[in-house]
Image (cartoon, helix red, strand yellow):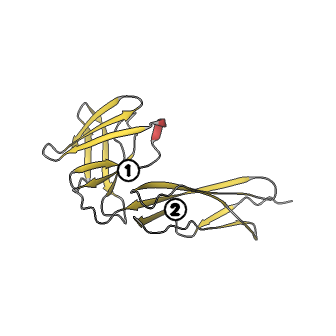
């Protein structure tokens, strides 16, 4: 007897970008061999609030094996005009800790930094509203519950406080 595990094809891909107010309908094709399965969908997308949200699709095959896949959905407001903060940053107190800030493809004001603190591997998504840095809703690494961050356009520096740990970082462009 052959066991076929659930396989998933995300109709819109692993990453989806929508604008605030735009509807998002999760959709996936799930199969077990030649048979179709109906996925259970956990969808926490708030299309009224800029952020990065995770949608989880899961299904159980006829042998009871569970499979799942995740999809990232970015919600952004194209009316917000950002300061461009792309580039490489370095921790002012630890030159071994660096991060790269890039604009999230398909958005105009949501940025991703590969490292903004903690153990040297703390990725962070944020939005720039002019010079104002806004940490957007997202699942944070290392069970962090909140990130308070700001950008100083004169000094071109970032301040980051990771809670509940109280870890405080200052980054500047390399």
Along the line of sight, which residue is nearer the eye, 86 or 60?
60
Residue 126 seen in render: yes
Mark 1 Cα-neighbour bin, 10 Å: few <14, some 14–19, many ≥20: many
In which quadrant will I find the N terminus? Answer: bottom right
In the shown orientation, is residue 4 left or right of residue 110?
right
**Residue 127, relative to residue 155: is it above or below?**
below
Q: Which residue is mark 1?
A: 136
Q: Which callout, 1 or 2, points to the residue nearer the camera?
A: 1
Q: CA distance from mark 1 to mark 2?
A: 19 Å
Q: Position of residue 20 (x, y in %)?
A: 39, 64
User: Judging from the image, what secondary structure is the residue with disc 2 in?
Assistant: loop
Q: Position of residue 80 (x, y in %)?
A: 27, 61
Indicate which disc residue 14 carries. 2
* Residue beneath the point at 52% across and 69% down: 12
Q: Position of residue 116 (x, y in %)?
A: 33, 41
* Residue beneath the point at 12% across and 45% down: 154
Q: Position of residue 38 (x, y in %)?
A: 71, 65
In the shown orientation, is residue 56 left or right of residue 113?
right
* Residue beneath the point at 71% across and 60% down: 6
């Amino acid at each position: 007897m052959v066991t076929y595990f659930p396989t998933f094809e995300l109709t819109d891909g692993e990453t989806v970008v929508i604008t605030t107010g735009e509807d998002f309908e999760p959709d996936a094709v799930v199969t077990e061999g030649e048979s179709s399965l109906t996925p259970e969908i956990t969808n926490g997308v708030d299309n009224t609030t800029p952020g990065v949200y995770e949608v989880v699709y899961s299904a159980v095959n006829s042998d009871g094996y569970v499979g799942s896949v995740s999809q990232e959905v970015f919600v952004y407001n194209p009316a917000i005009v950002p300061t461009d903060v792309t580039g490489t940053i370095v921790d002012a107190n630890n030159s071994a800790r660096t991060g790269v800030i890039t604009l999230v493809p398909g958005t105009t004001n949501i940025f991703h930094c590969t490292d903004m603190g903690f153990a040297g591997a703390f990725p962070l998504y944020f939005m720039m509203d002019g010079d104002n840095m806004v940490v957007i809703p997202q699942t944070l690494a290392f069970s962090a519950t909140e990130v308070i961050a700001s950008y100083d356009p004169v000094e071109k520096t970032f301040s980051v406080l990771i809670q509940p740990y109280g870890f405080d970082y200052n980054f500047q462009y390399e």
